[in-house]
Image (spheres, helix red, strand yellow):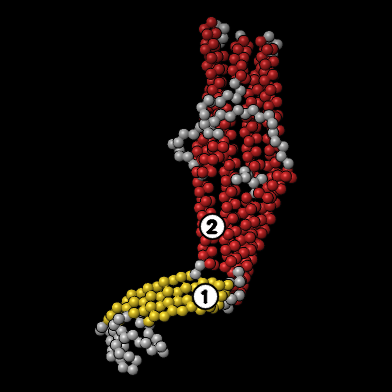
Amino acid sequence: MKLLILGMILLFFVNSTASQADALPGDDGLDLGQCISLALQNNRELGVSQAELAKANADLRRARTSRFLPVFDLKEIVSAVPDARGDLLNPETSAEDFSELGPFTRLDLELLQPLYTFGRLSNLIKAASHGVAATEWKLKAKKNDLVSRVTTLYYGILVAQHSQKLLEEGETTLNDVERKLNDRIRKGDATLTDRYRLGVARAELAQRRNELDETHHLAIATLKTTLGLAPEQSLSIKPVAFNLTDFATPDLNKMEKTAMMHRPELKALESGVAAYQALWRSEKAAYLPQFFIGGGFRFAHAPDRTDIDNPFVRDDFNTLEGGAAIGFQLPLSFWQTGAKANQARAQLGVIEHQYLLAKDAVALEVTRGYEAYNRATSDVRAYQSMEKESRNWLNASLQGFSLGLAETKEVLEAYVSYMQARLKRLLAVMQYYRTKADLDRLVGGQKE
């Protein structure tokens, strides 16, 4: 009698699950492209990188204004000064008399325009320009990393949805079996032991479903944060069937060359090397004179003081003067200049070695990603075959069980093998998409 009940349970469950192996909820949701687009628009990590890019552009604008626009200063003072009447030979007031005060104002306008600096300022502009390029490449690297993370979360949620559907089917099956089992117990064709066995199976199914629900909710919350969505916003993922048949076969040598040409981390370091080279040249230019044109204008007026028109006597309280001249400036503290140049050269050496180290690391990462992708494709094929063979094994066992030619243990082993194969195939497909996204990132990501 127990064999009959077991056969009924397994036949009902397998027929139900095998016919709906990869069914998903029918509600529409976001596809992968939409998730990536949202993440690129709203992710806060990209906001930090974009702010850093804005700062780099501001540094570039500042460097350009230092080279092409003059330093222009305007200073105005207003005060009270002692009255002074008379002239140089016949003063009418004393310099120590502060009893009478009058208004005083002075306006100073100064201008300094660099003319030729032997590359000091132009190299600062080049350094800032390369700094902008480096920041742009870092932003590109962040975007590539974000795309890879979103892809991993997306397919992880899909696997959880497939697994949830499988557990829902199992719960429905157990409900139907329970009803039939209760009828047989009332008729005396089954015992309470069969009910207890079914209760254990139901409890284990509920525990597995709780674990899966927790994992699914956490994945959804993580994806929401990655997409820049608020916690109260709803998010659903569009169902996708996991039926992979064709796999691309990448060429390792070609991928390594592509990574060396397009990997944004390497491009950022290349720009960094160029920036520090320009800074080094700028510091070395400080050994040479810096030519400039300077000019100024001054107007001062104190109405209660006599305006002296003698060109040989300077009067800072009543004056109107201005002019321009060409000159140069040369710092003579060459030891400080040399120390700054040596420091810039040392910084250049550091980033040059970082660049060479990064190239070796990128080549190794591409090789690892290539091997992981090939392993994932092989696993998908293997588990697809395993699922097919385990289904055939289970069907054969059930037929033999119905005819009394197969033992209960064999049927259970076949059933467990079939369910494990289905789950492993789902996990292998998720790993395939994860390694594929990672491989795209390792060779430089999507071209914009």
At x 65%, y 22%, the residue is 418
Nearer the observer, 135 or 428: 135
At x 70%, y 44%, the residue is 255
Judge depth for marks 2 and 1 and give the one in front. 1
**Residue wearing tag 1:** 293
How many C-alpha atoms fall within 10 Å of the one at disc 2: few (<14), some, or many (≥20)? many
Nearer the observer, 362 or 12: 362
Nearer the observer, 377 or 86: 86
User: Considering only vertical position in the picture, is 433 above or below 62?
Assistant: above
- Seen in the image, is 248 located left or right of residue 340? right
Mark 2 to mark 1 CA distance (whole Å): 29 Å
Q: Earlier in the sequence, mark 2 or mark 1?
A: 2
Question: Amino acid type of disc 1?
Answer: Ile
Nearer the observer, 357 or 401: 357
Number of numbered discs on residues? 2
Q: Secondary structure at mark 2?
A: helix
How many C-alpha atoms fall within 10 Å of the one at disc 1: few (<14), some, or many (≥20)? some
Identify the mark at residue 174; answer none if there is no mark: none
User: Considering only vertical position in the picture, is 277 above or below 223?
Assistant: below
At x 72%, y 45%, the residue is 254
Q: Residue furthest top?
A: 187
Residue 219, x across and y down, in percent? 53, 36
User: Considering only vertical position in the picture, is 159 above or below 102?
Assistant: above
Residue 394, x across and y down, in percent? 67, 18
Res 60 → quadrant:
bottom right
Residue 278 appears in the figure: yes
**Residue wearing tag 2:** 56
Residue 286, x across and y down, in percent? 59, 72
At x 41%, y 71%, the residue is 74
Residue 305, x across and y down, in percent? 31, 84
Res 297 → quadrant:
bottom left
